[in-house]
């Protein structure tokens, strides 16, 4: 019985944290609409990965990257986190 109660308390606390921290994300006003900053960072990361891919193909380094299905998403994450860190750090 005690394990179930402890598990329920954890679920409740996690739900409460998500509920109360949901409004802590910074927002950006773009064209009169408010977008969460993480959405802008993800879009920037995808565009940055596309630009990085074009540069790697142009320089000939794309052929050396293995496996590409992991390299380019990792590049998108790197750019996204870099944008978040430099623009929205606390």
Image: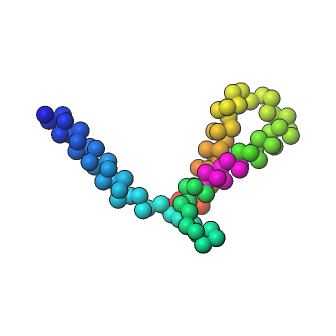
Camera-nearest residue between 53 and 30: 30
Look at 80% across and 29% down and name the residue there.
63
Q: In the image, residue 62 lies at what x, y percent?
A: 79, 33
Asked whether residue 80 is in view, the answer is yes
Question: Is 82 contained in the magenta span?
Answer: no
Camera-nearest residue between 90 and 76: 76
Furthest-bottom residue in view?
A: 32
Hey, which quadrant is residue 88 in on the image?
Answer: bottom right
Furthest-left residue in view?
A: 1
Look at the image and give the residue range highlighted in magenta. Answer: 41-48
Q: How many marks?
A: 0
Look at 81% across and 43% down and name the residue there.
55
Q: In the image, residue 51 lies at what x, y percent?
A: 77, 47
Q: In the image, residue 28 lies at what x, y percent?
A: 57, 66
Q: Is residue 24 above or below residue 3?
A: below
Q: Is residue 67 above or below residue 56?
A: above
| Main secondary structure found in the magenta portion | helix
Quadrant location of the N terminus in the rendered image: top left
Question: Is 46 contained in the magenta span?
Answer: yes
Hey, which quadrant is residue 75 in on the image?
Answer: top right
Look at 20% across and 39% down and name the residue there.
6
* Image-based side of 30 in relation to 27, left or right: right
Q: In the image, residue 81 lies at what x, y percent?
A: 59, 49
* Image-based side of 25 in relation to 87, left or right: left
The image's colouring method is rainbow
Hey, which quadrant is residue 69 in on the image?
Answer: top right
Q: Is residue 60 above or below residue 76?
A: above
* Image-based side of 14 in relation to 4, left or right: right
Asked whether residue 82 is in view, the answer is no
* Image-based side of 43 in relation to 62, left or right: left
């Amino acid at each position: 019985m005690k394990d179930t109660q402890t598990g329920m308390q954890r679920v409740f606390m996690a739900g409460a944290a998500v509920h109360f921290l949901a409004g802590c994300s910074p927002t950006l006003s773009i064209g009169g609409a408010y977008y969460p900053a993480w959405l802008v960072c993800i879009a920037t990361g995808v565009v940055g990965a596309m630009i990085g891919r074009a540069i790697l193909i142009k320089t000939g380094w794309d052929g050396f990257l293995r496996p590409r299905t992991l390299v380019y998403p990792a590049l998108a994450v790197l750019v996204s986190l870099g944008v978040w860190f430099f623009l929205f750090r606390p």
